[in-house]
Image (cartoon, grey):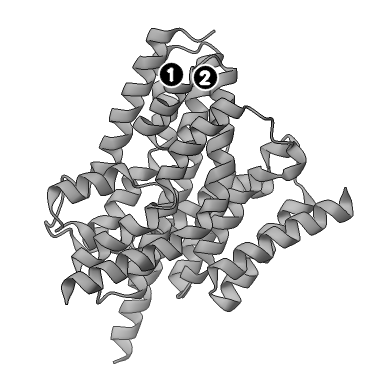
Amino acid sequence: MTTTTVKTAFLKGLADGAPFILVIIPFASLFGLIATEAGLSVLESLVFSLVVIAGAAQFTALQLLQEEAPTVIVLTSALAVNLRMAMYSASLTPYIGSAPLWQRAFAAYLTVDQSYVVAISEFEKNPQMTVPQRVAYFFGAVTPVAPLWYIFTVVGALVGTQVPDSWALDFAIPITFLAMIAPMFRTLPHVLAAFVAVVVSLLASGVPYSMGVIIGGLAGMLAGAALEKRLAQKGAGND
Amino acid sequence: MIDKTTLWIVIIGLGVGSFLLRFAFTGFVGDRQMPAWLLRHLRYTAVAVLPALVAPQVLWPSATGGEPDPARLAAAAAALAVGLITKNVLGAMMAGGVTLYGMLYLLG
């Protein structure tokens, strides 16, 4: 029964994305709070989150808007922060590229760090998943994330209570991403890719527009792919 | 005060731009076969981009003004180690969280 397995996949995605609830609530609230402090209305804050749905890029844009940077600079910087989404899109394409266009459009809108990392690790682990199952899983994984992003933007904008720095909420995102990535280090090329990405990203951290992340990411991908090819050739040579 | 026209240009521009970045491949490439060399590189997207994103936040957290922080370093190490050993995402998150708050309490 396809419908059953699709439903199961959605529910599994939902369960796997659920831990992010703990991360999204404080960060969405924080965005709502900062947005209203910057002079945005509650409605404007909500529309910002609805239309853009990308935490880091929204914070970047808001900060530059407050500094009265030229509009072109605001857009360029915030889009540069989001450039990794194109890399996520490319990485997801082999898995969901044959889904109907409207589903791909929704999936594109909902491609964020959290949904991407949950989905891609599942797709890699279970290559036998059908395309409808993958799409259902993806939408399941983003269900605990996107609605809460909108809702708590509004809550933050309305309530506006300052979250104390001592809560160290800034670190919820690094911890959740590290926890998600760690089980993905299955082969030596994966480990090398991450290592090179980290080193290059740190070296390039001074590059403007958050491009250090992209440069580091590309360097890691090149390193992982190069080692994979080398190992495959060596393996073939030994046969 | 943020100019309202500028704000709406940014919101709409950022919305359209972000969607296009996310739609670039899933939407426009779709089910067309991508070359093997490209797929080989894309296999490493997650394990390269996310660590590249996280590394500066771990080493130079903005919350401490960019100064390396023992509590955050230990929390990152704990999340990574538990994730590597147990392959359990929730366990790794909790290890990171407990370490962070434990260290902040001890050092604070």
- Residue at 56% across / 14% down in the picture? A67
Instruction: Judge the density around disc 1: few (<14), some (14-19), many (≥20) Cα neighbours within 10 Å.
Output: some
Which numbered circle lies on residue A64?
A: 2
Residue A173, percent from left and from top: 57, 49
Seen from the viewer's position, the closer of residues B94 and A178 is B94
Q: Residue furthest bottom?
A: A239
Taking the image as shown, residue B64 lies to the left or right of residue A57, namely right
Vertical order, A108 against A224 (above or below) = above
Q: Chain of mark 1?
A: A
Which of the 4 image quadrants contains residue A135? bottom left
- Residue at 61% across / 67% down in the picture? B92
User: Which amino acid lies under the numbered mark 1 shown in the image of this protein?
Assistant: Ile
User: Which amino acid lies under the numbered mark 2 shown in the image of this protein?
Assistant: Leu
- Residue at 88% across / 47% down in the picture? B108
Q: CA distance from mark 1 to mark 2?
A: 8 Å
Which numbered circle lies on residue B19?
A: none
Q: Which numbered disc flags the more N-terminal residue, 1 or 2? A: 2
Give the labeled residue for mark 1. Answer: A73
Q: Nearer the viewer, mark 1 or mark 2?
A: 2
Vertical order, B24 against B79 (above or below) = above
Which of the 4 image quadrants contains residue B41? bottom left
Q: Chain of mark 2?
A: A
Vertical order, B41 against A150 (above or below) = below
Disc 2 element? helix
Disc 1 element? helix
Circles 1 and 2 in contact, beta carbons < 8 Å: yes
Q: Is residue A211 visible?
A: no
